[in-house]
Amino acid sequence: MKIDPNTLFLALSNEIRLRCLMLMQLEGELCVCELIHALGLSQPMISRHLAILRDSGLVTDRRAGQWVYYSINIGLEQWAKDILQTTALANCEQKPFADDLHTLHDMPNRPGASCCA
Amino acid sequence: MKIDPNTLFLALSNEIRLRCLMLMQLEGELCVCELIHALGLSQPMISRHLAILRDSGLVTDRRAGQWVYYSINIGLEQWAKDILQTTALANCEQKPFADDLHTLHDMPNRPGASCCA
DNA sequence: ACCATATATATGTTTTACCATATATTTATA
DNA sequence: TATAAATATATGGTAAAACATATATATGGT
């Protein structure tokens, strides 16, 4: 999956898209409702930005029943994957990424999660 | 030099700024006139984008006589340096970066260069 | 005065956010 | 099993904001 630097950085240049990507990088695939909860933003807004990420080849989506799961495109060129990983590791304890992770983990009734402790 | 991911990726999201940065990453410090020549763009346009890169902390400038030299900020956080290096190595043989390098090397009377072959 | 560089202003273009609405899937009920 | 309602997600239209470019002008060094 060839991606040119401009496309990549344009996708990363929006805070909402970056927060979504960082969560996927750190947590693996996430459904739209989890991203809505973690970021605390409106559904159309999240959906819009996910569509931009999908159209630029950075993420792929998978429908499972009523839910749609998004994850980092496994076919991305290695240098692009490296950039996502480097960014995630260096910033996951900073705002707003740390807060997003925390809010995600506190989400009740996450789809796909086991029902009992 | 602390830089947040959003500031970094916003700076990288413009093709002109990215081309300037890639040249600096690969060649070390360059003066404004060299960047103008390599990219083939107007002086005010280059100057304006360099100002954006300077204001966001990615590059530093140094005046030497009539010329002003720009280079990657040596005090950048390591993860940001890594991203620049990764991007440069993975894309320096692609357009438009390869052409820019070539045009730069073909520039006559580069300031600071030795006068004879 | 001349050269290299920087900045200001005006204008055109792109991005973004918001609201409403549409589609798809599941659940509930007759 | 047909129908209706609820949930999850996507998209269209539009107005505001951010960004990029071009031209003109200013600054700073020789």
Image (cartoon, coloured by chain):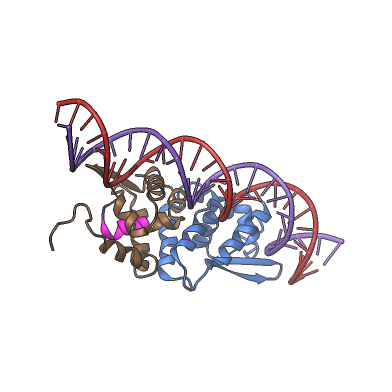
Chain colours: A brown, B blue, C purple, D red
Instruction: Specify whether residue A73 is in view.
Output: yes
Point 56% across, 62% down: residue: B53
Give how far across and how far down residue D19 sits, in percent. 57, 53
Splitting the image into 4 quarters, where does residue B4 fall?
bottom left
Horizontal side of residue A58 vs B68, given as left or right? left
Examine the rendered structure and indicate whether residue B94 appears above or below residue B79: above
Query: Which quarter of the figure has residue A55?
Result: top left
**Any magenta on residue B54?**
no
Q: Using the rendered view, name the quadrant where residue A57 is placed.
A: top left
Q: Nearer the viewer, residue B106 or A47?
A: A47
How far across and how far down the image is residue A105, in percent?
26, 63
Viewer-proximal residue among A53 and B99: A53
Residue plotted at (36% across, 59% down): A39
Q: Residue A110 location, x and y as percent? A: 23, 55
Q: Magenta region, mostly helix, strand or loop?
A: helix
Q: Compared with residue A26, is residue C24 higher up or lower down, i.e. above or below?
A: above
Residue A81 horizontal/vertical position (percent) = 33, 55
Magenta stretch, residue numbers: A20-30
Tell me, yes or no, if residue A84 can be seen here: no
The residue at 37%/63% (across/down) is A87
Picture quarter with the C terminus of chain B? bottom right
